[in-house]
Amino acid sequence: MKPTVIDRYAFTVDEVVAAILPNVGYRREMELRIDADGYVVIDIAHAPSQTVEAKQPEPPAKGEDFPGDSPPPAPSEPPLERPQGEAEQEARALCVTPLFRAFLEVKTEEAALRVLPGRCHVEKLEDLDRTKSKALNLRYLIEEFEAWKIV
């Protein structure tokens, strides 16, 4: 009897979704399942602050032909600050460290904050928390930094 060769691969749901949908962003819950027709279905529940509600424009007030004729409404409350993810917090903390700035070959924290996204292959530091693969870019840079310190 001839043995059967089996290749087995194991991935977490987060890794699969990050590979298929790299721009998922922040999420609260995720479920991966196969429906009755054989389709892979991914349900993603986003954090409440990340959901976007469609606002319907208000009809013009009586006697007002164009909404632009009236002054804009005063802001009712200040905009909420975006919470920082773990990878972004770690990246910002590294930029404060003088030795890490020397590794990046910059002198100031502001310069490090400008250089670091490019070194991590993201547009903004907040993108580091969008997927595991982007967060891994920071990990690789930190490993490179640790090796640089030894040399």
Image (tube, rainbow, N blue to C red):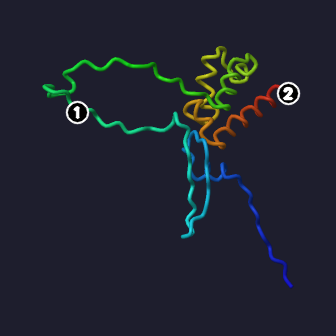
Read off the residue under disc 1.
59
Judging depth in this view, the residue of 127 and 119 nearest the camera is 127
Q: Amino acid at mark 1?
A: Pro
Earlier sequence position, callout 2 versus callout 1: 1
Residue sitting at x 61%, y 60%: 33
Name the spot of residue 55 as percent of width and height, x first: 35, 36
Residue 13 vertical placement versus 63 (above, below): below
Judging depth in this view, the residue of 144 and 5 nearest the camera is 5
Residue 63 vertical placement versus 110 (above, below): below
- The quadrant of the image that shows the C terminus is top right
For disc 2, the neighbor class at 10 Å (few under 14, some 14 to 19, many from 20) is: few
Q: Give left or right: position of 11 versus 151.
A: left
Label 2 secondary element: helix
Residue 76 vertical placement versus 41 (above, below): above
Q: Give left or right: position of 68 versus 121.
A: left
Residue sitting at x 55%, y 42%: 46
Q: Disc 2 and disc 1: Cα gap in Å? A: 66 Å
Name the spot of residue 84 as percent of width and height, x first: 61, 28
Q: Amino acid at mark 2?
A: Ile
Name the spot of residue 109 as percent of width and height, x first: 64, 16
Judging depth in this view, the residue of 58 and 102 nearest the camera is 58
Read off the residue under disc 2.
150
Residue sitting at x 62%, y 35%: 128
